[in-house]
Amino acid sequence: MGAVDNTGRKYLHLLAVDLQGGKYLHLLSIKNRKYNAGFEKACKFIGNYLQQKFFNLFQRRGTRPVDWEKINMEDIPMQDQSNDCAIFLLAYEEYLQKGWNLDFSQKDMTRRRGEIAAEFLRLFYS
């Protein structure tokens, strides 16, 4: 997902789908409620897709993805600079995937950029 502010800057959103817990998690690295507008619509779109694509699975489980809980994550690390949103989203994704607490901050972003660059180079040259 993405949003554009009145200066033309783009902000990325992460919409994580917890298939085990039956919920949607919305993560945004800037504090501005107006950028949450598309969250419900995106959840509905993804829920309908999952329900149609995997109908038998969800029918057996007795659940409907369109009815899952929608959580707008607010107590999460936030960026100080407008150019770090992608790095924050990659960090959110990694921490969620590994089950870690979201305990990083803006000061970690330079190191994170280096780690990402090193991983790209490792994959490129292997």
Image (tube, helix red, strand yellow):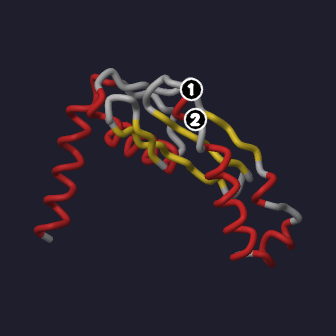
19 horizontally vs 3: left or right: right
- Label 2 environment density (alpha carbons within 10 Å; few <14, some 14–19, many ≥20): some
Q: Is residue 67 left or right of residue 29?
A: right
Locate residue 61 relative to residue 113 in the image: left or right: right
Residue at numbered disc 1: 33
Indicate the quadrant containing the C terminus: top left, top right, bottom left or bottom right: bottom left
Alpha carbon separation for disc pair 2 and 1: 5 Å
User: Which residue is at a point 32% across and 40% down the rendered structure image?
Assistant: 87
**Residue 53 image point, x, y percent:** 69, 76
Asked if the residue under mark 1 is in contact with the one under mark 2, i.e. CB atoms within 8 Å, the reply is: yes
Name the residue located 32 percent from the left edge and 35 percent from the top edge: 9
Which residue is identified by label 2? Answer: 36
Q: Residue at x 37, y 37 (%)?
A: 88
In this view of the protein, which residue sits in the foreground, 29 or 6?
6
**Outermost residue toward the left?**
125
The amino acid sitting under disc 1 is Arg
